[in-house]
Amino acid sequence: MSRKATPTDNAAMESYFHTFKAEAIHGKRFKNQEEATLVSKKYIAFYNQERLHSSLGYTSPEKYEKLRF
């Protein structure tokens, strides 16, 4: 658990949520909770399976994990 007002305690998640909000949420209005949940689930799948990450040598986390382990 990170301390209040210290986002560096959990930098990886802070970075993810910033990216998630910018790419999947910003400027969108959802009809209901189900639609918001669906968008979130689709983005998580995209983020892990398709989105290229510079910190992983421009591969997706899923591909990086398969190559690495």
Image (cartoon, rainbow, N blue to C red):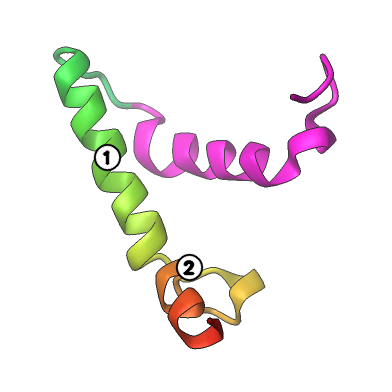
Please, what is the three-letter code of the amino acid marked with disc 1? Lys
| Viewer can see residue 59 | no
Considering the numbered disc 2 on the image, is that residue within a helix, a strand or a loop? Answer: helix
Distance from label 1 to label 2 (Cα)? 16 Å
- Check contact, mark 1 vs mark 2: CB within 8 A: no
Classify 62 as above or below 17.
below
Of the image marks 1 and 2, the number of the one nearer the N terminus: 1
Coordinates of residue 64 in the picture (x, y in percent): 50, 78
The span shown in magenta is: 1-27
Q: Disc 2 designates what residue?
A: 61
Q: Quarter-wise, where is residue 32 in the image? A: top left
Task: Examine the structure image and report whether residue 25 is included in the region drawn in magenta.
Answer: yes
Which residue position is annotated with label 1? 41
For residue 3, what is the image quadrant? Answer: top right
Residue under the image location 53 percent in, 81 percent down: 69
Q: Which is nearer the eye, 1 or 22?
A: 1
59 lies left or right of 5: left
